[in-house]
Each structure stands twice: as C-alpha cells, then as structure tokens.
Image (cartoon, helix red, strand yellow):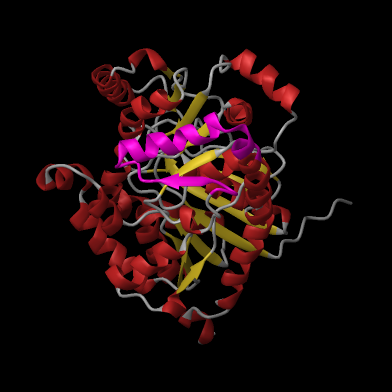
Amino acid sequence: MIRKKQFIGSILMLSLHGYVAAEPELGKPDTGGQVVFVLELAKRFSRLGYRVDIVTRRFEKQPQFDKINEALQIWRIPFGGNQFIRKEDMHDHLGEFLTNFLAAIRSRRIAYDVVNSHYWDAGWAGQKIAEELYIPHIHTPHSLGSWKRQSMDGDPQKLEQTYRFEERIRREFLIYRSCDQVITTTEEQSELLKSEYDLTEKNITVIPPGIDENRFTPVPGLKRTELRERLGMTTPTIYAVGRMAANKGYDLLIQALPTTQRLVPHARLLLAAGSDNSSRDQEQEAQLRTIAQDAGVLEAVKWAQYIPDEEMPDYYRAAGVFALSSRYEPFGMTAIEAMACGTPTVITVHGGLHELIDFGTQALFADPLNPEEYGAILAFPLRYPNLADELSIEGSRFARRTFGWTGIAKRTLAVFDQFKGKYTDPELETQ
C-alpha cells in the first residue's frame, strides 16, 4: 500500500507577470530575476516538506500546469485574454484573475496556509485572496514604484504614461499597509518603505535573495581558459546579462566602455540582453547600437541576446569581469551568481547590494551615471591580475556562504510561522 505523502503545510505563491515556467526563458519580456527567485524559493519550500502552488497567468499556448515535483507545481489561471500583458498594465485585469482563481480552488477544494506574493500586481491580488480565505499574506515587493520613479530620467508625463507610477504607488501603499509582513531584499528597500510608504520597523523583514550554490561554482584556471576559447571570450571581456529594460543601464555601460578601453585597449563588452524573438527588444538593441556607434565602440560590443539557462554559469566563468550597471536595482541577483562563479564583479551604487560587500575584497562598485568612474573601475580587474584573483576567491566565498537558497527558505518560513493561526473563518467559529 502506497501512503499519500503528508506535508507540513500548503503555500500559495503568486507571481503573475511574465513567462513563469518550470524552465523559464529568461530574458523574455518581464521574465528575469524575479522568476528565478520565486522558482528557487519554492523548490526549497518543497524540499523542506511543504506543498507549493506557484500561481501565474495563462496566455498564448502555455499549458495549465507545470509539475516540478510531487510537492510543487506551476498553475496558470487564464485572465486578460490570450496575449502577453506587460506588468505595468496587469492591474487592469486582476479582478478577473481573482474571480477565476477563487472559483478554481473552491471547485477543487484546495486550502492554503499562507499567501506569499511577489511584485505589486500579485501583492494586490494576494491581499484580496488572503482576506477571502482568512489566511496570512506575506509580500515581497522586488522593486518599489517610488524608487523607480525617482531613478528614471526623461519626460515625467511620458514616464507616467509608460509606467503608470501614480496607480502603482497608490496600490503599493495599500498592499504594504494591509498585508501581514513585507519581506525586502535589502536594508535600503526597508528604509524606503519607512520613508516613502509610512511602514514601521515591525512590519518589515530583510531577507536577501539566494543562489543555487550547486550550479554557480568557480572552476580551475585551465577550465576557464577552455570556456573562454569555446565562448569567444579570449580577449579581456566585460559581461552583462539581463532583461532588456531601461533601468538596467546598458546604455550607461556602453558609454563607460571608451574609458575602459583607454586603460585596457583590447577590452570588449559581451551584452546578453533580452530575447531574440521580441520586437520591443530588437528596437531597444537598435537604440543601443546607435549609442555604441556614437561612442566609437560599436566594433567592441558583441550582442549575444538570449543565453540558455544551462549555459549561464559558463558565461559568468569565462568573463574577465561582470558588470551590473543598473540605474536602480533592488538587489542584483546576476551579480551574486557571477561572484559565486569566481568572476570579478563591478556593481552599481544605485541599489542595496553594494552596502553588503567589502569593496576591493569581495567586489567593486561605482556609479554608472558617471561613465568615466564606472569605466575606470571596470578596467581594474582587467589590468591587475592580483586584484582579479582576490575578487575571484573572496567574492565566491562571500556569495556562496551568504546567499544559499536553503538558508533563505528557512528564514522565510520563520516569517510565515509568526502568523500561523492568526485568522479564523467566522463561519467555522459558529459551527
């Protein structure tokens, strides 16, 4: 006789925008670090004895379910039609999501112990679900509308039309004031929640993102040389990877390259931004090519676009230096992955990660809004092998010890446990 597996509890994780999948195509629109964050956290929850549903939006030709293991699945709920919807417009369709999701769990008699939502669109829906089901709601913002608005250059009216900041910030305020706890990834985010959204210290817990320490590992020098030959990175190479988005600062990185080349004449940039099947990404790449042409470095930039997930560690390992040049960055998971692989890393000062590292030992940081400063700092690990070795060893040690996913999951579960049994359905109390 086969016994049905008993779980410690049941967790609903909400991540509604982008292409959430068991094997996500990172770099597709609105599909980046947050998807990795949610998947890895959910996998650790399931290993620790919990049943987990990652609920997202069903559109295009996606299946209803991706079963990852006995305890974990991705469940796609249809709403908002069959076409991609960018995250800035997702809230127009959240009412339909709530109706469809609540009907689905009731028809299947599914119960959850806690809602853990990610980003503000899922946060708004998660709060409504928590209130409907009488369960706690723990929210992870990933980024803050107020911070993003302050960090972006351009015409305010056009930015408002594109990003809908007023609506986002209004709803964020209600989410943060209504949910049981907000989990931020950095102290800087916590301070912004207190100053911009009027939260108190007791409503915030800081837990950084994690990495898969079994995937992102350093390799010996001979292996690194082989990777550089295979991936075409035999010249001093700066590597950057991520979604094609204005806040990632790829234009700033390109503008910093002339300074780097004055110090390291053969330096090259490998830019893996976006995916190869998005017209929006192709348009933005064309704009970046124009910037590179104007800066006189077009021939020094290689455009890799989408990097398969299984190849990502090797690209990190082969690079001479990894660059995180964001205008703002809530955390910067790619930088931690690069450091874990033993790659010297230069991060932005416009985010919380730089506050955690020991400059010159574990990583370097600079202001990408100052192209000469950022370009010079990028050159340091390429010019000085002893510095590169120090950053490789200490950066990897720091990243792997500090950001392993199992420890991050246990800290998150401890937050969930604080609110266990807090709410009771009034109808059950009268029975």
Question: Camera-side residue: 164 or 382?
Answer: 382
Magenta residues: mostly which secondary structure? helix
Q: Can residue 129 be seen in this snapshot?
A: no
376, above or below 353, in the image: above
Question: Residue 177 location in percent, x, y?
Answer: 34, 73
Q: Which residues are magenta?
A: 360-389
Question: Camera-side residue: 221 or 250?
Answer: 221
Q: Residue furthest bottom?
A: 430
Q: Residue at x 66, y 20 (%)?
A: 227
371, above or below 184, in the image: above
Q: Residue furthest right?
A: 1
58, above or below 111, in the image: above
- Quarter holding the C terminus is bottom right
In the rendered structure, the answer to whether residue 92 lies left or right of residue 334 reads: left
Question: Residue 132 location in percent, x, y?
Answer: 42, 69
Q: Residue at x 50, y 70 (%)?
A: 205
Question: Residue 18 location in percent, x, y?
Answer: 41, 39
In the rendered structure, the answer to whether residue 168 lies left or right of residue 273 reads: left
Q: In this figure, what is the number of numbered marks? A: 0
